[in-house]
Image (spheres, rainbow, N blue to C red):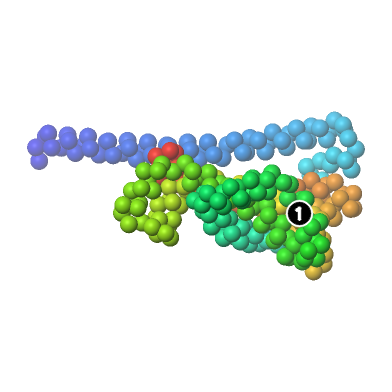
Amino acid sequence: MPTNTKDDLRSLEAGLDSLQLANVTRIHTAWWKRVLPPITAVALVWGVWTWAFNQQFQPEWVLPSPSMVFDSLKMQWEAGFVSASVWNSLKRGVIGFAISLLVGTPLGILVARIKVVRTTLGPVLAGLQQLPSVAWVPAAVIWFGLTDTTIYTVVLLGAVPSIANGLVAGIDQIPPLYLRAGKVMGARGLSSIRHILLPAALPGYLQGLEQGWAFAWRSLMAAELIAISPQLGPGLGQLLQTGRELGDMSLVIGTIILILITGITVERAFFSPVRRRVLRNRGLGR
């Protein structure tokens, strides 16, 4: 084999090895950028919390230590309350959000595309989005009693406006040229919505979905905190209320941490990867 050819092959192999090493380094760097900040934040909160407890700014029954909170959660876990509460709340949240998605998506399309509907329902959706979800709980209890219907009603009233408004905002940002091009290509009616409208509005729609999940989760906690009944079974809101009634601050703080972790886990496991993929496909992310 000629010397020049061998040199070219060596250069090509060296270039490929360098490119592979750069990709691996980039992956590790991106992983640390995602993992290190949350770990640092948790360590900082843990340290400040422990320091405040050691300084005895408040009695133990007002400000328990992290270990006391952990022991309280461990006791509740061994009794089976933690796993049952997390599972029931998560199940209700997912079901309520799925129903809200089925209601909020067509509602958002109607508001965005039909002027009369926007004039009529637009201000109502904006007002509902500003209304605290807990305000619906007493009314829902009177309407439906202490049942799952009450909980899902509160979740829908909290999540649907955010999903619909997010989709409306996404559709409003679509360049008119896209819609005209779709008509020229024969996309009309449901075909236009599926192939033109929703894909073009996806970033705004996805933001509405994320906000809708946040509202659904908060609404669920408000409903479970007030609508308590043996027929409803356990839930994180009920566990929080139990801690309040017993004056057990360790259980109260532990339940708050469980609520926070569960909500963040869903957001990180589902919404964050989808958002990054959508932005990357549009050349807006890494």
Question: How many neighbours does mark 1 have within 10 angstroms: few (below 14), some (14-19), or many (20 or more)?
Answer: many
Looking at the picture, how far across and down is residue 43, in whole percent?
68, 36
Residue labelled with disc 1: 136
> Which residue occupies the foreground of this view, 144 or 253?
144
Question: Helix, strand or loop at disc 1?
Answer: helix
Where is residue 25 shown, x and y percent of the image? 42, 37
Using residue 260 as the reference point, say whether residue 36 is left or right of it.
left
The foreground one among 159 and 91 is 159
Q: Quadrant of the N terminus?
A: top left
Any part of residue 35 in sight = yes
- Report x, y in % for residue 91: 66, 62
Q: Is residue 264 above or below residue 38?
A: below
What residue lies at 77% left-to-right and 50% top-to-bottom?
135
**At 69% from the left edge and 61% from the top edge, which residue is drawn?**
152
Decide: is 143 above or below 133.
below
Where residue 137 sits, quadrant-wise, is bottom right
Q: Residue at x 40, y 43 (%)?
A: 176
> Relative to 36, is 97 above or below?
below
Name the outermost residue toward the front.
Answer: 116
Q: Position of residue 246 (x, y in %)?
A: 90, 53
Residue type indicated by callout 1: Trp
